[in-house]
Image (cartoon, rainbow, N blue to C red):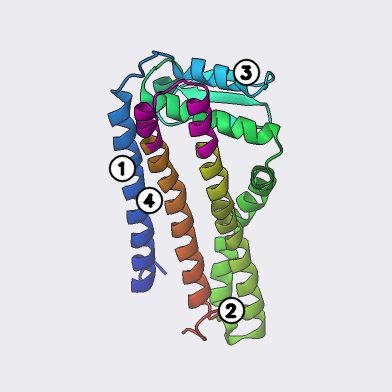
Amino acid sequence: MIFDPLYLIVIGIGAAISIGASMLVKSTFARYTQVGSRQGITGAQIAQRILQDSDIHDVTIEAISGSLTDHYDPSSKTLRLSEDVYGSSSLAACGVAAHEVGHAIQHAQNYAPLKFRSAWVPVASTGGNISIFIIFLAFMLGGVGSALGGMVAIIGVGLFATTTVFTAITLPVEFDASKRALRCLEHGGYLSNEELGGAKKVLDAAALTYVAAFLSSLLTLLYWAYRLGLIGGRRN
């Protein structure tokens, strides 16, 4: 399929969207990393204070290596902040740290989309790993051109769809975490209205990477379904 012009177009569009989103988040993060908050509170301090404000006392905050590697681990209730966030008092650091605390708050409040995403991780991982083999088997069997090929095609595309579902459910989880983050930063008085604008730009840029991942996965899913004849009629 690497010689299929349509495949190259789909992959190219997906790659362009992903690369564009990645470049935007990196440039926006770099820009606001250079802008310090007036209160001089580090990302780790912001995270700890918001956790206390939210009456959450069982989450551990750790520093990890790398850039933009920040994440919240619900299995161990650990909030891991990258070097650029943990000890920095920049607007970018404040926004990212608060965003990760937003996930901790979601976890504490049993936010349904987060619970679903966590439960769906092994499903998407398994489905994504084996789907390509099932899809190519479906091609070898002629796709919907045969009863067996059609059945295998449905299974293969269905398995790939598990990854698309994961990227889709990630969107409300991430958007909600950012909303919680900005609300906590404002209500806690940690950033001024002007500073909140900078933090919001960082979080909005980061959100585009999740939108890009969903669009890329969806395009690929539609491509496989089209080529196997599941949509748009039978393909040669």
Q: Amino acid at mark 3?
A: Gln
Label 3 or label 4, whichever comes before in sequence order = 4
Q: Quadrant of the N terminus?
A: bottom left
**Residue bearing the label numbered 2:** 141
Label pair 1/2, CB-CB below 8 angstroms: no
Q: Which residues are magenta?
A: 179-200
**Residue bearing the label numbered 1:** 23
Residue at left 51%, top 66%? 221
Please name the predominant secondary structure of the magenta segment in the image.
helix
Please tell me whether mark 4 sits on a helix, a strand or a loop: helix
Q: Amino acid at mark 1?
A: Met
Label 1 or label 2, whichever comes before in sequence order = 1
10 Å crowding of disc 4: few (<14), some (14-19), many (20+):
many
Q: Amino acid at mark 2?
A: Leu
Label 3 or label 2, whichever comes before in sequence order = 3
In the image, is residue 41 above or below residue 234?
A: above
Determine the image quadrant of residue 8.
bottom left
**Alpha carbon separation for disc pair 3 and 4:** 36 Å
Q: Is residue 71 visible?
A: no
Label pair 4/1, CB-CB below 8 angstroms: no
Q: Amino acid at mark 4?
A: Ser
Residue at left 53%, top 21%? 47
**Residue bearing the label numbered 4:** 18
In the image, 118: left or right of 95? right
Label pair 3/4, CB-CB below 8 angstroms: no
Q: Is residue 49 visible?
A: yes
Please tell me whether mark 2 sits on a helix, a strand or a loop: loop
**Alpha carbon separation for disc pair 3 and 2:** 59 Å
Image location of residue 195, percent across then percent down: 36, 27
Image location of residue 150, percent across then percent down: 62, 80
10 Å crowding of disc 3: few (<14), some (14-19), many (20+):
few
10 Å crowding of disc 1: few (<14), some (14-19), many (20+):
few
